[in-house]
Image (cartoon, grey):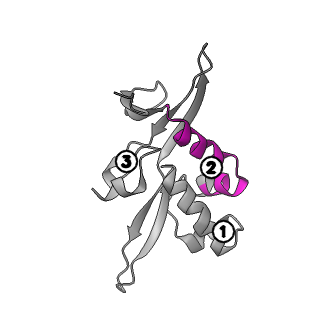
Amino acid sequence: MSQSPMVPSSVQFADRQSSTEETVVRDEDAIQDLLDAFNDAGSRAILDATSDEALSTNEISEACDLPLSTAYRKLDQLTDAGLVEERTRIRRSGKHASEYARVVEDVVISIDSCGEMELRVSHRPCADQFGGRFPGAPRDERTN
């Protein structure tokens, strides 16, 4: 039986009021997806822009000075990596729109004495109530 690539646990941080959900990622593909996302300046700008409030793709494109097509592509990558989540912005007009919010607080990379790498991902407390998922989980698992 293979070891699960992610091990969720609850951790209390000294400088935070509430406990934060933490995921340990050991799967090499999931680690690479996260590192690829952090290696991209546009993706980092999106993570920064969505840290305080959920934004639509148009708002992200404008705030990050990215072409709209690039913003969509990067949002897909960030969503697949579990760093942002797509939500629905309800409008009175009935034309609901997608918006995106960052769902992680911290990502810490560790390498043990055997050279094995793992990432510890701390999720924001409200992520699960909006359908947040763990990094590395296949996209279709969100709909179950």
**Secondary structure, magenta segment, majority class:** helix
| Residue beneath the point at 42% across and 56% down | 139
Q: Quadrant of residue 70?
A: bottom right
Q: Is residue 36 magenta?
A: yes
Residue carrying label 3: 126
Q: Residues within 10 Å of mark 2 (few under 14, many from 20)?
A: many
**Residue depicted at 47% across the width and 24% down the height:** 14
Along the polypeptide, which appears first: circle 2 or circle 1? 2
Residue 60 lies, in percent from the top left, at: 60, 67
Q: Quadrant of the C terminus?
A: bottom left
| Residue 132 place in picture, x, y as percent | 38, 50
10 relative to 71, above or below: above
Q: Which residues are magenta?
A: 26-46
* Image position of 10 with respect to 137: above or below: above
Q: Position of residue 112 (x, y in %)?
A: 59, 17
Q: Which residue is mark 2?
A: 37
Mark 2 → mark 1, Cα distance in angstroms: 13 Å
Q: Quadrant of the N terminus?
A: top left
The residue wearing badge 1 is 70
Report the amino acid beneath label 2. Answer: Ala
Packing grade of label 3 (10 A; few <14, some 14-19, many >=20) is: few
Q: Residues within 10 Å of mark 1 (few under 14, many from 20)?
A: some
For the residues labelled 3 and 1, the Cα–Cα distance comes to 27 Å
Instruction: Classify residue 42 by image quadrant.
Output: bottom right
| Among the 4 quarters of the image, the one containing residue 107 | top right
Q: Is residue 1 left or right of residue 38?
A: left
